[in-house]
Image (tube, rainbow, N blue to C red):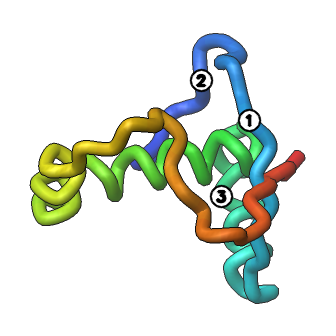
């Protein structure tokens, strides 16, 4: 049984660029094929799972009092377009 499920509808998305080693890219592509969904969906759901499971991150996040709703990327390029 798959850990992640295919999305019921197309959510609003943002483009993010990242670099993966060949093994991670290949496995991502195969997992997306297995689920019959896009690699973008796999990445999105995997990140949501990590965020939910990481209690330290949740504590840190709730303690943040930023004025901006946009996270700082510290000058890094942030673009993901996987199809």
- Is residue 71 at least partly visible in the picture? yes
Question: How far apart in space, not on screen, are marks 1 and 2 (Cα)?
Answer: 16 Å
Residue for point 49% across, 43% down? 45
Can you say whether 76 is above or below 1 in the image? below
Instruction: Indicate which label's residue lies in the foreground, 3 or 1.
Output: 1
Judging from the image, what secondary structure is the residue with disc 3 in? helix
Question: How far apart in space, not on screen, are marks 2 and 3 (Cα)?
Answer: 14 Å
Instruction: Indicate which label's residue lies in the foreground, 2 or 3.
Output: 2
Question: How far apart in space, not on screen, are marks 3 and 1 (Cα)?
Answer: 21 Å
Residue under label 2: 7
Do the CB atoms of the residues marked 1 and 2 lie less than 8 Å apart? no
Residue for point 66% across, 12% down? 9
How many neighbours does mark 1 have within 10 angstroms: few (below 14), some (14-19), or many (20 or more)?
few
Residue for point 72% across, 38% down? 36
How many neighbours does mark 3 have within 10 angstroms: few (below 14), some (14-19), or many (20 or more)?
some
Count the marks.
3
Residue under label 1: 14
């Amino acid at each position: 049984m798959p850990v992640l499920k295919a999305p019921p509808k197309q959510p609003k998305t943002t483009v993010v660029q990242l670099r993966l080693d060949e093994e991670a890219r290949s496995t991502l592509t195969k997992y997306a094929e297995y689920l019959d969904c896009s690699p973008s969906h796999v990445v999105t759901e995997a990140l949501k799972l990590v965020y939910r499971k990481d209690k330290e991150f949740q504590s840190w996040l709730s303690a943040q009092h930023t004025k901006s709703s946009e996270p700082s990327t510290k000058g890094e390029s942030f673009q993901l377009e996987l199809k």
